[in-house]
Image (spheres, grey):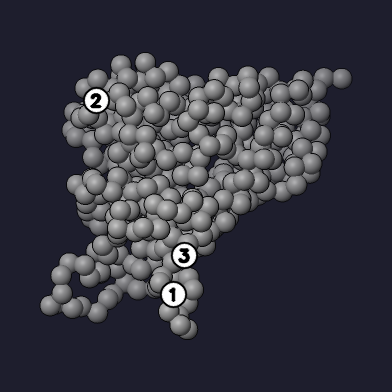
Amino acid sequence: MINQPLPSENPRSTRLHPETLAVTAGRPEPVADAPLNPPVVFASTYVGAPDTDSATIGYGRYGNPTWQALEEAIGALEGGRALTFASGMAAAHAVLELVPTSGVIVIPYNCYLGVAEAVDRRAARYRWQVRRVNVADSKEVLAAAQGADVVWIESPTNPTIEVADLPTLGKNLPSKSLFVVDNTFATPLLQRPLELGADIVLHSATKILSGHSDVLLGAIVTRGDDAQTFEALDAIRRSFGATPGAMEAYLALRGLRTLPLRLAQAQTNAQVLAERLVDHRGVQRVRFPGLPTDPGNELARRTMSGFGSLISIDLPDAKTADAFVEGCSLWVFATSLGGVESTLERRRRWSGELQSVPEGLVRLSVGIEHVEDLWADLAQALDRGLPG
């Protein structure tokens, strides 16, 4: 295993702004004629050193210098210690391994479909009690958390864009409850859940962190002083073999370098589009915390440093929503999100999507294209669906 430095051992993680850390963290110390950035290392087998301690890698399932560089960068941005996984769902399953048999887990009514399905399958197998909550209602979450082993929160949620009061939850959740926050939508540039009381932060690094729609990757970050949780998750990764590929880790780190620029442009675009979508008579509801009328606006202003790049809109029904999606030409019909390109989809087209998600809800992942081009494409597709 490669011993990753704790945040306190790396002075750069405490004195640099996140925008700078995104560019510099995980980079090797400068040496003349050495690569500026860590090169990709393709290796399953490493030369042994029997006289050294456990800091050596040992085997390809236990570590890789390319993973280490990416994990150092993600850990520095979140303020903890990171582990990367083969996908976001691999990371999620590793966390779910920490729930004991006959345990109690709290999850959102509205959350990522894959997580909801994984929880339900494991609940049937391991006799879990699953308590579903509205993450925007802190009293409801705190009540459900009594006696819970794990409290799993997405904020903002996927795909309904609800915002949780992470500071309140982090301060008041029972100490025995493991507090897990999926920070995929916000990224560590908009909120750092570990500083707000979370024990574990989860990312689908496939999405905004890597940002170019070419990587399948997950990440988990634990507090720097919580060696027990970190080591338990590392042991699960080793045992299950849910390790990232070296090339995927290399690409994710390269994508992470531009995260501040990508997110800033996408957020700016999203704000403009959300404000225009509100005024279009073909749209029943716009879900975006940057709107003053959004239920999560005040909370997002208080707890986040931005509103993100995801918008969901409610159209009258599935037929109208499908026609809208098919009517777009610049926006790409795709199920993932967080890339430099703008994508959209009707979420209930998936048979397993949660019934709490409206049939006509379309999730928009706003990219970095020119906002007027994005709006023109949305407007013409929406106009087609207007009567007469």
Q: Is residue 117 visible?
A: no
Looking at the figure, which quarter contains the C terminus?
top right
Give the residue at mark 1: 30
Give the residue at mark 2: 174
Q: Which residue type does callout 1 highlight?
A: Pro
Query: Which quarter of the figure has residue 116?
Result: top left
Contact between marks 3 and 2 (CB within 8 A): the answer is no
Indicate left or right for 13 with 256 as reference: left
Residue lying at 15% horizontally and 70% vertically, measured from the top left: 53
Q: CA distance from mark 3 to mark 2?
A: 39 Å
Q: Is residue 127 visible?
A: yes
The residue mark sitting in front, 3 or 1, is 1
Local crowd at mark 1 within 10 Å, few (<14), some, or many (≥20)? few
Mark closest to the chain's N terminus, 3 or 2: 2
Indicate left or right for 281 with 44 as reference: right
Q: Which of the pair 369/88 is nearer the observer?
A: 369
Q: Which residue type does callout 3 highlight?
A: Tyr
Residue lying at 69% horizontally and 40% vertically, measured from the top left: 269
- Identify the element where label 2 is drawn: loop
Disc number for residue 250: 3
- Identify the element where label 1 is drawn: loop
